[in-house]
Amino acid sequence: MRILALLPTHEPPAYLSAMAAAGHEVHLVTTVRQRENPREVDGVQVWPLGYWWRAKQAARPDVLVTVADDRQAARLMPNLRRVPQLVLPHYDADFGVFEEACIRLLPAHRQAQARVVVPDDPLAGQVTKVVAWIHYGVPYRRAGSETMLHTMMRALQNAGMGVLVVCSSMPEAPPSWEVDGVPYIHLAPRAADLLFRSMRPQVMVTHHDYAARATGLAREIGARPVLLMHSDHDYSARSMQAGPDLIVYNTEWVRASLATRYLEVDRTPSLIVHPPVVPDEHRAPATGDRVTLVNLSSDKGVYTWRAVARALPKLPFLGVTGAHGRQVTGLVLPNTQVIPQTSDMRGDVWAHTRVLLVPSVYESYGMAAVEALASGIPVIAHPTPGLREALDDGATFIDRSDARSWAAAVKELYPDGDRRAEATAAALARSAFLTDSMSTELKQWVEAVQALA
């Protein structure tokens, strides 16, 4: 539902922000004159009075909202005669009453679609309920953070807890699905909020886009909020200030980096859980002949991969599009093949890979590289702190800007021989070490959540 409100305020009232959070498109034209540019506040697009005509064109409203006795709004309303109008008696309004009043102005066939439908508690009867509120989830998005959260929720389920993952930013997902026995549902933010309030989970896990909101909601309903930190970026780290009861860092270096800038690092209980990779789920029976890059974005090193492919025209190269970042798939070289993102990395990628390139400008860890180690695939990587912590002596490190050295390393590791045998043995040894560490860290994770619950 698209709403255009003409109100005498510079900031959106709570009920408009709630409408935006529930998935409605909300525009506010302030009828009080001001010298500002259009801006977004709490999901509401706020337009100064001088932009009202542009706001009308952008909103294409289903419902027009005004407040009684607003003379400026009354002057503009003749330009919107065909739009159903809701006149509020005063500036404040209850969200539920307001939403229903707007819906009733829609044509009958659209009213059902616009109403927020809250499902029954999927974990009814469970003694311990642990929910995760996130933006994306597997298998529709398989970046490192989604995969890590999934494996951690699966560990909790295996320990006998009731778990549920709610995704609120994936319109391509069905209403519900399961992955490895872990239940997922897709709900708009407002419906998810209402579901959690009725469920009353003991623990709420979150990260990225929903971190601050989920933490605040957990406080309101008496749940224990847990925040997963996947990087040392400030836009993610600021969510620590919402006050989670436990922070899980994906690497030692991320925690150390954030500790220099955020007091919350030392004040909040924490765990280190490196992104879990179960080798048996990724190990290919046999590897292939391709020099592979996973995620064809510039930050992940697509131009380094292309430069190496151009320098070694007789070797076959494989590119796999990623879940995040603008994918650079044009100008395909004769010796390169590009395939879409896949849920079967073992069959579609590792079974065809002979050498993996990881020339990322930033990796907080590097799960794809660790998955490759399980098959004994030699890895060449840019020495980011995360990749060094993940791969240690199980990979070859070269600066991503030195494409000539990357090509030389591929020529050295590609053919059978002593150098390749050494690299394969180092990869398998590192994989075995990480597997042992994973078992210990997941056990600590389960115990920490049990203590919170």
Image (tube, rainbow, N blue to C red):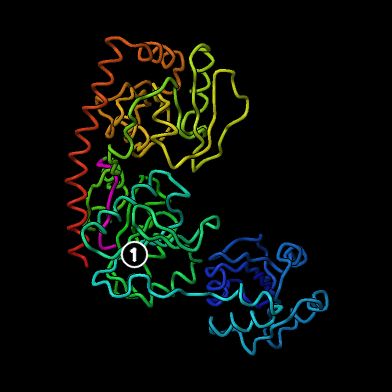
Q: Amino acid at mark 1?
A: Val
User: In the rendered image of this protein, does residue 149 appear above or below residue 409?
Assistant: below
Q: Which residues are magenta?
A: 243-252
Is 406 or 41 nearer to us in this picture?
406
Label 1 environment density (alpha carbons within 10 Å; few <14, some 14–19, many ≥20): many
Quadrant the N terminus occupies: bottom right
- Locate residue 28 relative to residue 176 in the image: left or right: right
Mark 1, residue position: 131
Q: Quadrant of residue 121?
A: bottom left
Is 279 or 356 nearer to us in this picture?
279
Quadrant the C terminus occupies: bottom left
User: In the rendered image of this protein, does residue 371 appear above or below residue 58?
Assistant: above
Is 161 or 295 nearer to us in this picture?
161
Residue for point 57% across, 76% down: 115
Q: Position of residue 231 (x, y in %)?
A: 36, 45
Q: Quadrant of residue 88?
A: bottom right
Residue 248 forms part of the magenta stretch:
yes
Q: Position of residue 410 (x, y in %)?
A: 40, 15
Residue for point 38% across, 14% down: 414
User: In the rendered image of this protein, does residue 414 appear above or below residue 451?
Assistant: above
Kind of element beneath mark 1 = strand
> Which residue ends up furthest to the bottom in the rendered image?
89
Residue 190 forms part of the magenta stretch:
no
Q: Position of residue 298 (x, y in %)?
A: 52, 32
User: In the rendered image of this protein, does residue 291 appear above or below residue 313?
Assistant: below
- Locate residue 69 relative to residue 450 in the image: left or right: right
Residue for point 70% across, 76% down: 63
Q: Position of residue 79 (x, y in %)?
A: 82, 74
The mark tally for this picture is 1
